[in-house]
Image (cartoon, rainbow, N blue to C red):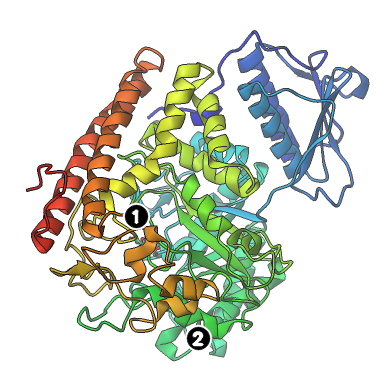
């Protein structure tokens, strides 16, 4: 199947004034990443400006120069861009910086940003900027909404043109680490660390390396038993430790650029140290010791909770579990262990508070995990631009110290002065022609990379860049798509989830409304609605979750008056007649937002329809179909939720709209 180049599909623009003289590129050192940077520049300049750029060994005759320069402030990944006297110069201390700088120049050509004689300096905000693929070796993708895997098929590893094009896309927005396989490591995937797969992994890792990306793998904690025939995977047993040490030595000999491993342990049925009465620190440290000689990292997920809860027990709370499990272990992890924490305490709902593990751990490396695969946010059939949500998460103050205490400070290393930290996204790609199923979902892939590279960019700035790179310069196209993207998250929230209550989806599949789908369920995800009201009491008198935050956050959430209203029902059970700050009752708010949300979905479909003729037909029709579905589906959400709560509360809509 053919595929497209997403935001790297360059649009010819011969009116562009080329700011450099001559048609030669010069690099003062060569290596495969610099070669890639030069090739990227050649391709872009040819396609955008129609100019063939040759290569020269003579600095004086070059129009574009890539130069390595010792500059500790910039580091290996930072760069400077300057355009003076007809010469465009990109400078960095490392090859990766030169590649990122070259992609930045390309973006400037795409967006017609002026090249200035002043130095433009940029250094990535987050040290680790990672994509997590949940790809299985049979080719399926867990929570994948854009076709099958382009890494695996029939238990084989695929390394081809698409691998390179994927690496280009990822590198162009600054991604420097990729986990290629699902965190649920089962069946054949356990064998990925075995010799049988090392040749292909080596080829893949070389391609990645060219684009400044380190390959990571997800590990099966029980591999010593499943691969090594040991009778245990106990991290404190010498035979087990030895097995891992040997395995890592073997792997790193063949794959010296391997970044390390991602581990989901003791979670949703996956094996882990609990089986042996050991802690997560025991488990993570054993692996960390095994990879330390090769500078490997162990990224250990904190998504650990009891998925066998009793719904009758009002004290158990899934939201508490990440903190309860990991906070006591603060300070016990090795330096090359990073805890990967989902943005919220539950699981990628459209609205959640920030996980209290941020700021809760003072001596532990942490990484933020977000999901751009839209599992709970419309599965790439609905538009939902998530960068505004991620920005809110990053700006959240944890109060773990007087200043430099936001999630952003923590994951960019400002709080603790560490470099083993960063941001990871569960990625939304597959082998669909356009990579992300919904064309507009590519804004999340692009935006995620851009945000990690520069956390001070606004969601709107990022969206504008993506739109121009993808669709070109037509004003109306830009304005309307920007409007759609910027409203989409809130719109989705309006017709799905009221005031911080999530999970009203069809079980397993997680698509479409089902108010009680998870209500009397062992997964521990409730709205607790009855005829008087709804919400989960998570204060001192309830599950106590609010107390996991530092002050003043704990009190803010504890008190119904100060709790941010978008999270009201996450933290409090309130009656349907509870009055919100708008003066509306809680039930009226539900009715109103659901009507509004569905109207907004219809409005987005109209906006897109009005762009007919201005967007490539194939793309236009693809998106149009999805928006038409979203519009209908939003009504279904509206009607099910409104009817459900009307029937529970028997309080009529003040505006007398049809509620069934
Ligand atoms: C949930 C997904 C499940 C994943 C799990 C995880 O529904 O498929 O395995 O997260 O993050 O959101 O491990």
Q: Is residue 379 in view from this perspective?
A: no
Q: Which residue lies furthest to the front in this view?
A: 583
Q: Out of 163 and 11, give the one closest to the viewer.
A: 11
Q: Where is residue 425 in the image (x, y as percent from the top left)?
A: 49, 53
Q: First in sequence, mark 2 or 1: give its number.
A: 1
Question: For the point 46% across and 44% down, which residue is it?
Answer: 158
Q: Where is residue 610 in the image (x, y as percent from the top left)?
A: 33, 18
Q: In this view, does 306 lie above or below 9?
A: below
Quadrant in which residue 603 is drawn: top left
Question: For the point 71% across and 13% down, which residue is it?
Answer: 52
State which image quarter holds ligand 1. bottom left
Q: Is residue 439 above or below residue 491?
A: above
Mark-to-mark CA distance, 2 and 1: 28 Å
Badge 2: how crowded within 10 Å, few (<14), some, or many (20+)? Answer: some
Q: Which mark is residue 142?
A: 1
Q: What element carries label 2?
A: loop
Question: For the point 83% across and 45% down, which residue is it?
Answer: 93
Q: Position of residue 643 (x, y in %)?
A: 11, 52
Badge 1: how crowded within 10 Å, few (<14), some, or many (20+)? Answer: some
Quadrant in which residue 264 is drawn: bottom left
Q: Which mark is residue 279?
A: 2
Q: Is mark 1 within 8 Å of ligand 1?
A: yes
Q: What element carries label 1?
A: loop
> Left or right of 89: which side holds 312?
left
Quadrant in which residue 409 is drawn: bottom right
User: How many numbered marks does the figure carry?
Assistant: 2
């Amino acid at each position: 199947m053919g595929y497209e180049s997403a935001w790297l599909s360059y649009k010819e623009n011969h009116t562009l004034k080329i700011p450099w003289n001559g048609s030669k590129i010069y690099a003062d050192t060569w290596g495969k990443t610099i070669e890639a940077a030069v090739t990227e520049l050649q391709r872009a300049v040819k396609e955008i400006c129609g100019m063939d750029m040759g290569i020269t060994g003579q600095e004086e005759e070059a129009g574009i120069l890539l130069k390595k320069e010792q500059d500790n402030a910039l580091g290996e990944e930072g760069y400077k861009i300057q355009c003076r006297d007809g010469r465009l110069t990109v400078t960095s201390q490392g090859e990766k910086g030169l590649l990122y700088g070259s992609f930045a120049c390309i973006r400037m050509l795409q967006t017609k940003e002026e090249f200035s004689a002043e130095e433009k300096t940029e250094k990535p905000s987050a040290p680790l900027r990672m994509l997590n693929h949940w790809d299985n070796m049979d080719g399926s993708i867990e929570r994948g909404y854009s076709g099958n895997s382009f890494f695996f098929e029939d238990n084989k590893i695929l390394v081809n043109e698409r691998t390179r094009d994927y690496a280009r896309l990822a590198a162009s927005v600054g991604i420097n680490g990729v986990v290629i396989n699902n965190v649920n490591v089962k069946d054949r995937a356990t064998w990925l660390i075995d010799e049988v797969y090392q040749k292909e992994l080596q080829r893949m890792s070389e391609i990645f390396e060219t684009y400044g990306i380190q390959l990571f793998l997800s590990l099966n904690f029980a591999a010593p038993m499943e691969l090594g025939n040991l009778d245990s995977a106990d991290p404190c047993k010498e035979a087990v430790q030895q097995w891992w040490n040997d395995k890592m030595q073997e792997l790193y000999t063949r794959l010296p650029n391997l970044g390390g491993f991602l581990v989901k342990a003791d979670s949703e049925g996956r094996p882990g140290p609990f089986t042996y009465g050991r802690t997560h620190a025991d488990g993570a440290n054993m692996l960390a010791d095994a990879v330390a000689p090769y500078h490997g990292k162990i990224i250990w997920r904190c998504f650990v909770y009891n998925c066998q809860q009793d719904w009758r027990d009002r004290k158990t709370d899934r939201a508490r579990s990440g903190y309860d499990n990991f906070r006591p272990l603060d300070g016990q992890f090795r330096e090359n262990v990073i805890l990967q924490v989902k943005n919220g305490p539950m699981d990628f709902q459209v609205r959640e508070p920030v996980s209290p593990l941020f700021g809760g751990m003072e001596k532990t490396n942490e990484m933020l995990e977000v999901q751009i695969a839209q599992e709970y946010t419309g599965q790439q059939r609905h538009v939902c631009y998530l960068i505004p949500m991620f920005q809110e998460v990053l700006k959240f103050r944890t109060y773990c110290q007087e200043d430099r205490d936001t999630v952003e400070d923590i994951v960019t290393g400002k709080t603790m002065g560490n470099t083993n930290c960063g941001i990871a996204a569960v990625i939304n790609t597959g082998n669909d022609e356009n990579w992300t199923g919904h064309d507009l979902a590519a804004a999340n892939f692009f935006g995620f990379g851009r945000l990690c590279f520069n956390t001070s960019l606004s969601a709107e700035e990022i969206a504008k860049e993506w739109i121009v790179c993808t669709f070109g310069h037509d004003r109306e196209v830009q304005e309307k798509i920007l409007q759609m993207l910027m409203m989409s998250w809130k719109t989705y929230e309006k017709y799905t989830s009221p005031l911080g209550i999530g999970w009203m989806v069809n079980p397993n599949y997680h698509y479409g409304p089902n108010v009680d789908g998870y209500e009397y369920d062992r997964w521990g995800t409730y709205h607790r609605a009855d005829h008087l009201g709804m919400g989960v009491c998570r204060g001192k008198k309830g599950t106590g979750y609010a107390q996991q935050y530092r002050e003043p956050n704990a009190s803010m959430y504890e008190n119904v008056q100060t709790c941010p209203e978008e999270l009201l029902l996450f933290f409090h059970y309130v009656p349907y007649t509870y009055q919100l700050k708008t003066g509306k009752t809680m039930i009226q708010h539900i009715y109103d937002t659901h009507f509004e949300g569905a109207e907004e979905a219809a409005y987005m479909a109209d906006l897109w329809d009005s762009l007919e003729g201005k967007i490539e037909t194939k793309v236009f029709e693809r998106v149009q179909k999805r928006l038409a579905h979203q519009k209908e589906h939003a009504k279904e959400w509206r009607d099910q939720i409104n009817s459900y709560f009307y029937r529970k509360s028997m309080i009529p809509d003040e505006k007398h709209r049809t509620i069934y």
